[in-house]
Image: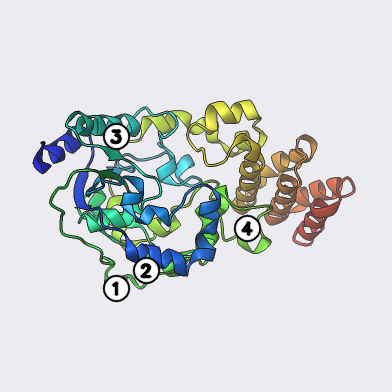
Amino acid sequence: MITKKEIIEKAYECGFGDIGFTTAEPFDAQKTLLQERRPSYEWVAKSGLDLWAGTDPRSILPLAKTIIVLIETYFNQAFPASMERYFGRCYQDDDRIIKNNLAKRTKAFRSYLTDNGIITKVPPHLPHRIAAARAGLGTFGKNCLFYSNKLVAKGSWVLPIALVVDQAFAPDDPTLDIGCPDWCKNTCLTACPTGALKGPRHIEPQKCISYLTYYGQGLTPRELREPMGLWVYGCDHCQNVCPRNKPWLARELPVNQKVAAMAEDFRLEKLLSMDIHYFKTRIWPHMFYMSENELWRWKMNVARVMGNTLDDQYIEVLAKVFDTENDERVLGMAAWALGRIGGPDAEKALKEIRYKSEGLVREEILSALQKT
C-alpha cells in the first residue's frame, strides 16, 4: 500500500498547493448547525444538494476511513480590472465545465489512488471547508471563508477539494479556530453591504450578494439594488476588505492570459444584448450557475450594475432594451438603472417609454422618474 508521504508527493506533482488528512468521522457539529438554520439552507436541498447527508462521509462511501483534502489556489495570477470589478475571482478561471486544468489534475490524482487500490469519492455536498480545517490546512475567517495556513500569503483565495477514501491514514492536527486578529474590528462583518454576515461561522446565505446574483428569484428588491453595487456574478467584497488578505492583494502578479483573452466577451453592453447562442458559447462555459432559461437574470444584473456605475454612457443602451427585450424583470431593472443614473437624457428616455409600458415595468418607470 502507498504511504501518506507518497500521496503528499503526488499531490504536489499534480500541481496542488497543499494537502492534509483527517478522519472520516461525521461532522456532527455541522449537522446540528444545519438543523438549527434549516430555513436558511432548504433552498440548497431543493437544488439537489443534500448538505445534511454530506455531514456523514459514510453516506458517501460506506467504507470511508479518511478524508484527503487538496488545496487549490484560484488567485495566483491577476485578473483584468474590467473583470475584477464585476465578477468574483473564483469564477473567472473555473474549469468545471471545460475541464482543461483543475479537473484534469484532480482526475490524475484520483487515478493515482485508484491504481494503488484506493477507492475515492469527491462529494460536492461534504463540508469541504470544515474538512480542510479539520485536516490542519487553515483556519476560518469571520466572513465564513477558509484561510490557508501557507498559500496566497495565508489568505482566503483557495479552494479545498475533499476526497473521501476507503483506507486509513494518520490524521493531521486540526486547526478549526477563527484565525482573525483582534484588531481587525470585524471589518468584513460591518462592510457586507447586504448584512449577510452575522458573525463567525454564521451567514444568511440568501442575503449574500453572490447568492442574489445567480439564485435570486424575481426582480431584485429595491432596497438591495444599490448595496449590491457593481457585482454581476459573485462577490469578493468581504475578501477585498479583509486585513488577512491585504498582503496578497498588494502583490504584483502576472496577468491571467486566459481570462484576459475572454474579457471582451464580458463587456456589460454585450452581456445586456446577448442572445442564447452568445451565452451558451461564450459565457456559460465559464460562469454556469445560471442556465439559458435564466438569461433574464444575467441581463437584470447587468442593468443594475450599469445603473450603479452612475455613468451616463449607459443611458442609450439601457433605453434600447425596451425595443429588444420583453421580460419585465429586465425592463423593470433597466428603468431603475436609468433613474439611478439620472439627468435630462435619462429622464427623456424614461418619459418616451412610459406610455408604452404597464404593470411592474410602469411602476418602476414612474419610480425612476421621481429620481431624475
Q: How is the image coloured?
A: rainbow
Q: Is residue 38 visible?
A: yes
Distance (Cα) linking label 1 and label 4: 31 Å
Q: Residue at x 19, y 37 (%)?
A: 11
Circle 1 residue: 183
For mark 4, give the secondary structure.
helix
For mark 3, give the secondary structure.
helix
Q: Quadrant of the C terminus?
A: bottom right
Distance (Cα) linking label 2 and label 4: 26 Å
Circle 4 residue: 225
Q: Nearer the viewer, residue 114 or 155?
A: 114
- Looking at the image, is mark 1 or mark 3 earlier in the sequence? 3
Category of crowding for the residue at label 3, using alpha-carbon neighbours closer than 10 angstroms: few (below 14), some (14–19), many (at least 20): some
Distance (Cα) linking label 1 and label 3: 38 Å
Side (left or right) of 81 relative to 135:
right
Please identify, in this view, whether the residue under mark 1 or under mark 2 is nearer the observer.
2
Q: Is residue 133 above or below residue 186?
A: above
- Looking at the image, is mark 3 or mark 4 earlier in the sequence? 3
Q: Position of residue 54 (x, y in %)?
A: 38, 52
Q: Position of residue 327 (x, y in %)?
A: 75, 42
Circle 3 residue: 106
Distance (Cα) linking label 3 and label 4: 38 Å
- Asked if labels 2 and 3 touch by Cβ distance under 8 angstroms, the answer is no
For mark 1, give the secondary structure.
helix
Q: Residue at x 76, y 47 (%)?
A: 328
Please identify, in this view, whether the residue under mark 1 or under mark 3 is nearer the observer.
3
Side (left or right) of 372 relative to 256:
right
- Looking at the image, is mark 2 or mark 4 earlier in the sequence? 2
Number of numbered discs present? 4
Q: Position of residue 208 (x, y in %)?
A: 51, 59
